Each structure stands twice: as structure tokens, then as C-alpha cells.
Amino acid sequence: MGIIKDRFKEKSDKVGAEMKEMLKEHGDKKIGEVTLAQVYQGMRGITGLVTETSLLDAQEGIRFRGYSIPELQEKLPKAPGGSEPLPEGLFYLMLVGDLPTEDDVHHLTSVWQRRSHVPNHVFATIEALPASTHPMTQFVVAIMALQTESEFAKRYAKGMNKKDYWEATFDDSMDLIARLPRIAAYIYRRKYKNGDHIQPNGLLDWAGNFAHMMGYEDEGFKELMRLYMTIHADHEGGNVSAHTTHLVGSALSDPYLSFAAGMNGLAGPLHGLANQEVIKWIFELREQIGTDSPTKEQITAYVEKTLSEGKVVPGYGHAVLRKTDPRFTAQMEFGKKHMADDTLVQTVWNIYEAVPPILGSKAKIKNPWPNVDAHSGALLVHYGMVEYEFYTVLFGVSRALGVLASLCWDRAFGFPLERPKSITNDLVKKWLEGKDEVWGD
Ligand code: HAX
């Protein structure tokens, strides 16, 4: 077995045994209560999943295995001359549970380089789609085409022992993560650069090579990709892309099928597609007002107009967070360091001043603060990536790190098929009338 696989096995055996012991002793203990509103309104706040890789606090934001984003920026290994963390390091941390050494990160970079070959039929499948197809659709179709390579599916068909599920999941996850930048870059160059594709550079790190294959050689853009791939990787288990990957994986669908399902969720405008919606919204604002530098008053009027048309202000609000998303702050810091005089970036900062008081004045909106998607597009536009329909694919490549590390843990723990209970309105009415109805099974 490889070094990382061995370490994962050692760790997951230990944690898995502790978990079994804990459940044996405390399995009957109650964890919280469920209200009718929670059942009807998106299951907010119902604890129903175990996800080891990261934990979200409403006030403080995300911590990956206990580490905040600024801590990761300090502690994770960097590219030579760089100051942003290498996403390989975050993946190691999420998967193994310990901070990686420089050697661990170099090892992962070379493993992913070695495993990055994408079979020709995947490119042919992408080519079969009309070029006008949304990049997220192309991305999901390509992942599905790549499913022919699944070790999990092949081994399951031959009769795999339950004890080996984690290993086949691990192998598929490593292959998939290694190959995603190549696929995403192919879609980008096909759709926006006349199919003028760029071969991978075997000397670069995972995110740096991704930037290179998309055609961005600026070191600033490579640093942005390292930061971007790190901060978008995981947001505990309940968000749509993570939960969907976990749910579909619970049917023992292989990692390709599970991840593709998660990506279909990421493609929704209330989730990952919000990053394209933000820039689209700002471009429309600029066009309608007739200036590239709208004042705060003009922004305020535009926000009111958006709300009066029954639309959401993209990039603002969150199902869990109740403060400015630290992923927004990390990007703002990057902007201040690399492009403080960029007018689009300044507009994002002006929107940050204008929007929270307006949304905060609407009683129903629980969080008026910006989320990760409010900032990312402006940084990409600065380096010339203006094709905003592609942005969610970048998010998706990053999200693979978190959800696939979690999928390895799901199979190592032997988590069962996920199957919560649903009810009908009629049953609820009878229950409220005091009729002693059985909820069913
Ligand atoms: N603009 C306008 N209205 C908003 C709003 C916003 N930014 N955020 C919340 N609301 C509204 C909701 O639409 C909801 O209205 P209705 O009762 O009429 O349906 C009401 O306020 C209550 O919503 P909430 O409880 O505060 O928030 P939810 O947990 O239901 O939804 C969302 C969280 C992120 C979906 C929501 O804030 C939203 O739609 N934001 C804009 C889209 C966005 O930025 N999505 C990305 C989120 C982060 C992420 O997943 N990135 O990938």
C-alpha cells in the first residue's frame, strides 16, 4: 500500500473502533429535538450526520480538523516563493487528520501527477456536447464518462468484501482528484479558447498545474488558485454538494457516481452557482447604472430593486453562518495584497458595506453577511478570467477534496444506507389533532 493509504488505514481503524465502542455504550442517548418547522424547512439545525473533515460554527465559520483558514495559511506547506497553502496539504489534513510535512505534500503532488491520465473517451464525450452547454453540465457529463475507470465498481461486480470498500473508495478518490483539473481545463479551453488545449506541466503542484492548463501563467493567478482550491474544499457535511455525495455514496454508488451527484447540487444557484450569479449581477448593475464604479447609494438602490423583483442578492446569506464568512475575508485579504486598486474588487467591498444593513433590516433574512461566493469572481476577473459561467467548475474541482476525503471515511466507518423518515401533511394534521397515529416505518 502507499504511504498515505497506510496512514489512513491506521487512523481509520483506530477511530472506527472508538466509534463502535462509543455507540455500544451511548447509542440510546438523545441528541437534540426536532420541531415541526425544522421538518418542513430544510432540516436546518437537525444533527444527523458525522463528517470528520471539517466543522462549521455559525459565528466563527469553518475549521478544517480544528484549524481556521488563517491557521491553515500559516501552517500548511506552500509552493516555492509562494505564501498561500497548497491544497494537497489540506487534503492530507482532512484525510489523515494530522498536519502534513513538506514531504507529505510533495508526495501527494507526485501521486496526483502520476494518476492524472484522462482516457480519450472522456474528451470525446465532452466534444459530443454542444459547445454552448453550461460548463457545469459538461463537467458532470465528463465525470460520468470517467466512471468507466472506477475500481470500486469493478471490484464490487466481482464480489468485494465489505472490509475492502474503503480501499477501493480511496483509490477511486485519488484518481478522480488527480484527473479533475485536466478535465476542467479541457472544458475551459474548449468553450472559451477555441479548443486550443495546453498540456500539463509535470513540475507544477496540483493547483499551479490547473492554472497552467487553463492558460494562466501569472504567478498571482497560481497563488489565487492555491488559496481558492483550499478555501472551497469543504464546509462540513450538511451542505448540498457534500450531503449529496455522502447520500449517494451510502447506496454504495462508486465515488464517480457519488461525486457527479454532488456536483449536480453544486450547480444550483442557491449553492455553488452563486459565484457566477454574483459577477453577473455586478456586471448588470454596472451596465444599468452606466458606470464601472457605482457609488454606495447606487448599489443600495440596485439591491432594493433586486429584492423588489423577488430575487435574492447573490453571495449574501447562509443556512448556517451568522457572520461574515471567513472564506470571504481570506479573499478580501488576497485582494488587498494583490489588487487593492482594482475597480471591480473595490465594488465588491462597497457592496459589502451597502448590503448587510439592507438585508439585516428584513426580519425574515437570518444572515445579512457575505458568503464565499460574494468575492471570488472579482479576483478571477482581475487576472482575465471573465467567463463567469465557468466559475462553479473551479468550485467543483476544489470541493472534490473535501467530499471525497469524507467518502473514504464513510466507507472506512462502514456507514449504512442513508434513509431518513418522511411524513405527509395529513399525518401531521392528525398528529396535531391529538390522534395517536403511528408514524410508520
Ligand atoms: N437575498 C434575498 N433574500 C434572501 C437572501 C438574500 N441574499 N438570503 C436569504 N433570503 C431570504 C430567503 O430567500 C428566505 O425567503 P422566503 O422565506 O421568502 O423563502 C428568507 O430570507 C429566509 O432565508 P434564511 O433562513 O435567511 O436563509 P436560508 O437558510 O433559507 O437560505 C441561502 C440560505 C444561502 C440559500 C440564502 O441566503 C440565499 O438564497 N442567498 C443568496 C444565494 C447565495 O449566495 N447562495 C450561496 C450560499 C453559500 C454557498 O452554498 N455557496 O456555495
Image: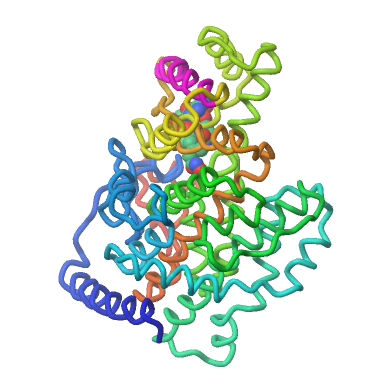
Residue 238 on the magenta span: no
Relative vertical location of residue 326 with respect to residue 77 in this rendering, above or below: above
Residue that lies at the very extreme toward the left in this rendered image: 25
Q: How far across and how far down the image is residue 205, in percent?
A: 50, 61
Q: How far across and how far down the image is residue 429, in percent?
A: 44, 41
Relative vertical location of residue 165 with respect to residue 337 in this rendering, above or below: below
Magenta span: predominant SS is helix
Q: Between 119 and 200, which is closer to the camera in this rendering?
A: 200
Query: What count of labels does the image hold?
Result: 0
Relative to 410, is 222 on the left or the right? right
The C terminus: image quadrant: bottom left
What residue sits 73% from the left and 53% below the top?
Answer: 189
The colour scheme of the drawn protein is rainbow
What residue sits 75% from the left and 66% below the top?
Answer: 123
Relative to 397, is 183 on the left or the right? right
Quadrant of res 125: bottom right
Residue 359 on the magenta span: yes
What residue sits 83% from the left and 62% below the top?
Answer: 128
Quadrant of res 54: bottom left
Relative vertical location of residue 10 with respect to residue 92 in this rendering, above or below: below
Q: How far across and how far down the image is residue 248, in percent?
A: 53, 65
Highlighted range, magenta: 345-360
Residue that lies at the very extreme toward the bottom in this rendered image: 158
Q: How far across and how far down the image is residue 285, in percent?
A: 64, 18
Q: Between 206 and 230, which is closer to the camera in this rendering?
A: 206
The N terminus: image quadrant: bottom left
Relative to 92, is 201 on the left or the right? right
Residue that lies at the very extreme toward the front in this rendered image: 81
